[in-house]
Image (cartoon, rainbow, N blue to C red):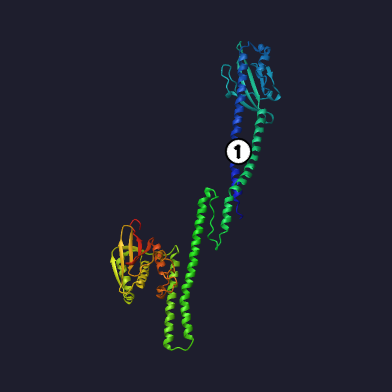
Amino acid sequence: MRPRSLTATLALAFATTTLAVFGLVGSFVYYALERQVGVQDDMDIVLAARHTRRLADELRDFAEIQQYRERIESQVLGNVALSLRVLDSAGNLLVQHNVDHNVSSLSLPGHTVPADAQITENAIVSLKQQKHQPYRMLAVDARLKNGTIAKIEIVRNMRDRWLLLDHYRDRLQWAGGIGILTAFFVAFYLVQRVLTPVREMARSASAVTSDKLHIRIAVDRLPRELNPLVASINGMLAGLERSFQHLSQFTADLAHDMRTPLANMRGATEVALARARSAEEYQALLGSNLEECDRLSRMIENVLFLARAEHPRFARHMRDFDAIGELRRIAEYFEGLADDAGVRIVIEGNGFVTADAELFRRAVSNLLANAVRYTPRQGTIVLSANPDADWMRICVENEGDPIAPQMLERVFDRFYRGDPSRGGPASASGSSGLGLAIVRTIMELHDGRVYAESDARSTRFVLLFPVVTPADS
């Protein structure tokens, strides 16, 4: 199905609205004119009947009616649409004026205004003759001086009004049709002009490609009503640009980090194959390659975890548990590594935390592994839990060289290490550069926060888990 044109749709809607307005206004004016004309004609009929009856009331008998017929006929002179007939009590015609065959053949109305009753518009009746030609007729009685009754009939031929109203209605219809067409084309033109900014937006948006994500839609020449839409589109483009840059950097870093263990395995293998080696040397080579494979495996596992964690349906199993008890179990797991590194782990604090236990262990373990790696021998690592009204504060604090302030902003980025060459202690220790990024992702899954502090005394990584009240749960 072909999509409809917005311009044509709006123009048609405007024309339809104009048609409705023209129809309502035209109908109102037409019926108001028809009523006004009818009221005026009925008033002429009533006045003619009143004057004629007043004149007849002053006459003695039927003979005087015929004698003063000119005075009686003068009551309808000047209006060619008015007809007059005066009949005696037996129905014989005494006086008539402007009475043609159609008027004379009209059926007499069943109601006649009595001689002593007031003549009003309510007594007028509508009649139709040939070709449905309309008439308005009023019959009244007049009491002569001798007590006899004469009947006066005033008839108004409504043909001229009929033709006038028909002509007026035709004019309204023609004017309405022309007005609708004019409204449609004017609306079409105006809508085309109004939609020009939308077309400019489309041209600007079409310039955005994968290598031109920095382009934004200008808002200075757009109507105010489009500003929220443009702001949303520009925000979306900014988000896409950040995501694309993040993805590109992530891909480059992943390729760089995977290339290092692969290059190590390739170099060691090439050296071993350069000449015959003893069984012990081959065994050492296989052990080295196995370590590099483990490093690659950990890296791939971490990348897969980050990818799964970004999915909106990532499963979490939230529950309340003792934070100190969980920190003790984690410290026991790292006891062997800590002994080998010559450092001591201390547990402090109290309280319960609401979190996914597996993710909690992984976040704290990553921080603790990082602390063991960078704590000097004979140093101390402190794991603490301190609750307050809004947060459960889990802190991993270790002695050692402070982290530069500009580096604290980036330590949670993926594949970021403090050594720019990637060949320093982090690389040598087998770090993949994803541990702290995983910690930040875990905290985002818990609607929490993570941040780092460092000074000459120690370095502290702090996890803030929101305190969940019974009402929230």
Q: Residue at x 47, y 74 (%)?
A: 258
Question: Toward the viewer: 406 or 135?
Answer: 406
- Image quadrant assignment for residue 81: top right
Looking at the image, is 163 positioned above or below residue 91? below
Question: Toward the viewer: 368 or 4?
Answer: 368
Question: Toward the viewer: 403 or 340?
Answer: 403
The quarter of the picture where the N terminus appears is bottom right
Looking at the image, is 308 positioned above or below residue 196? below
Q: Which residue is mark 1?
A: 22
Query: Where residue 330 appears, x then y in whole percent?
Result: 33, 70
Q: Secondary structure at mark 1?
A: helix
In the displayed orientation, state which residue is furthest to the right. Answer: 101
Give the total number of marks visible in the rendering: 1
Q: Amino acid at mark 1?
A: Phe
Looking at the image, is 426 positioned above or below residue 272? above
The quarter of the picture where the C terminus appears is bottom left
Query: Where residue 361 appears, x then y in whole percent?
Result: 35, 68
